[in-house]
Image: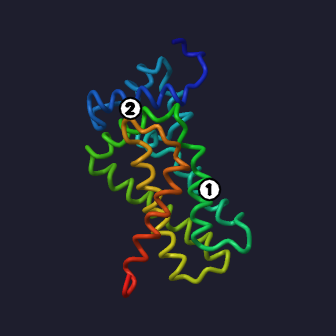
Amino acid sequence: MGRWEPNARDRLERAALALFAEYGYDATTVAQIADRAGLTKSTFFRHFSDKREVLFGGQDMLLELFGQAIKAAPPAATTADCLAAALEAVAVAFIPERHDLAPLRAAVIAANSELQERQLLKRARMAAAMAEALRARGTDDDTAGLAAQVGVLAFSTSYARWAAPGNQRPFTEIACATLDDLRTRAATLAPGG
C-alpha cells in the first residue's frame, strides 16, 4: 500500500497491534510500526504522540462524549439515566469494523504492567469526568462519585463483552444490559436485598 493511501491512522494502529502481538510492546519501535504500515515516522507522530497512544489514543474523545451526554440529558433524567446516556454516547467508537482490534489490544495491555497502570489511570479519568458532569447537574458529591464508579465498571464490563471473540451484539445493547445488571446486583446489597 502506498504512502499516499488514505486511512493512515487506522493503518498505523493495525500495524502496531500486529507488531506488539508478534514481538511484544517493549521490543516494537515507532520506525517498525511506520514501516509495516507503509508510512513514515513523521506520519506516525502526526497521529500519535508515542506508541502507547496507539492503545489509548481515543481516551479524550470518550471523556468528552461521557461528559457531553450527561450534561445533555433531560433535566428530569435520573443519575442512572445519565449513565445510560453516557454509555450510549460512546458506542460510536465501538463499531463492527474495529471489533477485530479489541482482542489484540486487550492482549497487549494484559502482557505489560506499565500499560495496565495506564489503563487504570484512564479509568480514573473516566470516573472523574463522569462525576464532574453529574455534579454540574446538581448531584451531590457522594452520589456523583459512586455513580461514576458504577459508570466506569459498566463501561469496562461492556467493553470486555463487546471485545470478546465471536461477539456480534452492538456495544449499545451490551452496555444497556450491563448497566441494568449492575443496578440489579447493587440492589441486592441493601439490607434485606
Where does label 1 land, which residue? 64
How far apart in space, not on screen, are marks 1 and 2 (Cα)?
Answer: 25 Å
Left or right: 36 with respect to 21? right
Estimate how packed mark 2 is, as few (under 14), some (14 to 19) or many (20 or more) residues with alpha carbons within 10 Å. many
Farthest top residue?
2
Q: Quadrant of residue 32?
A: top left
Q: Which is nearer the eye, 4 or 120?
A: 120
Q: Residue at x 62, y 69 (%)?
A: 133
Q: Which residue is mark 2?
A: 17
Q: Quadrant of residue 75?
A: bottom right
Residue at screen point 28% across, 27% down: 22
At label 1, which amino acid type do we have? Answer: Glu
Q: Residue at x 49, y 51 (%)?
A: 174
Q: Characterize the local packing of mark 1: few (<14), some (14-19) or many (20 or more) Cα atoms within 10 angstroms.
A: some
The C terminus lies in quadrant: bottom left
Q: Eyeballing the image, is 92 above or below 16?
A: below
Look at label 2 and name its amino acid: Leu
